[in-house]
Image: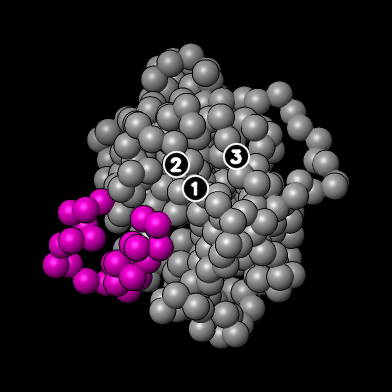
Amino acid sequence: MSLNPPVFEVLPRDLSAYRQGNVGIDYVHRFESGQPGPHVLINALTHGNEICGMVAATHLLDTGVRPLIGTLTISFANVAAYESFDPARPFESRQLVHNLNRIWSGDELDGTAESPELLRARQLRPVVAAADHILDIHSTSQNVQPFWVYPAYARNAHAALGIGTPSVHLVMPGGLGSGTPLIQHGRHGQPHGDGVAVVVECGQHFLQSAADTATAVALDFLAHFGLMAPRTTARPTAAPRRYELLETCMVRTPDFRFIRPLIGFEVFAKGDLIATDGAQEIRALCDDCTVLMPTREPIVGREAVYLTRPM
């Protein structure tokens, strides 16, 4: 049984007006300043029910944001899944077949498998590869505080800490562990280089606060790299709290169960039981083991929970 039925403060809107981009790929819009500078990609809707990114991307387009330097690209990734949204089943439009945020390896993109998400990833591959810096906007199924997610490269930490908000960071020293996300495609998944690629998780999918966070972070990300002037309304910043990803636990059987309801950021002592999955027990790997993004509905083959520790 799902916890905390969602409150619908923000719902999908018709995106057909944004379909015709200017790079020959649907739902991709690029603006060049004519001045030297970085190429920044703001990407929304990697998951179809993560509506906050749509709000941020349409805000940038509707208000006519244009880069002062460099190049700005704005993309809506999985519009097909987004268009399948049903308020009676609001979490099912995350994807149609594949998780679009786990298929960005060369093997997947160059392979022979087919799905709407693989087709779209192959279309977007040159868009992602062309960007120097990437902000991929996401949201969470539960109403938890926003946080960054990024590979443990100093360049990513420097940018996220420099932007300041959100103040919580999930750092992946060994990758996600369940596939290759968009922010680790190609050179952005390599330890050397200066290209920043980060996810921002903005809060619960359908809350206005998540949409507001997504828009603010997108503007701050652009300002950080000089593509626009800093916002005049400063947001309060808290001391950073960073968590290291220790393990991505997958759902392996239909019998997966948490030992108690979890929404994220609960803390366990070393050895404490967190969940059972058939005969397997999932236990805390260390003291202060903090769980992030526990699944609402266990589905075999998908992520169950991220085990982390404070850094």
Q: Are marks 3 and 1 in contact (CB under 8 Å)?
A: no
**Chain part drawn in magenta:** 105-130
Does the rendering let one see residue 103? yes
Closer to us: 126 or 118? 126
- Residue 63 occupies quadrant: bottom right
Tell me if residue 106 is in the magenta stretch: yes
Q: Secondary structure at mark 3?
A: strand
Q: Secondary structure at mark 2?
A: loop
Q: Is residue 171 left or right of residue 59?
A: left
Residue type, label 1: His
Q: Is residue 65 left or right of residue 309?
A: right
Residue receiving disc 3: 147
Q: Is residue 26 above or below residue 251?
A: below
Q: Is residue 311 above or below residue 152?
A: above
Nearest-to-viewer mark from 2 and 3: 2
Question: How dense is the environment of label 2, judged by Cα within 10 Å: few (below 14), some, or many (20 and up)?
Answer: many
Find residue 133 and name its label. Answer: 1
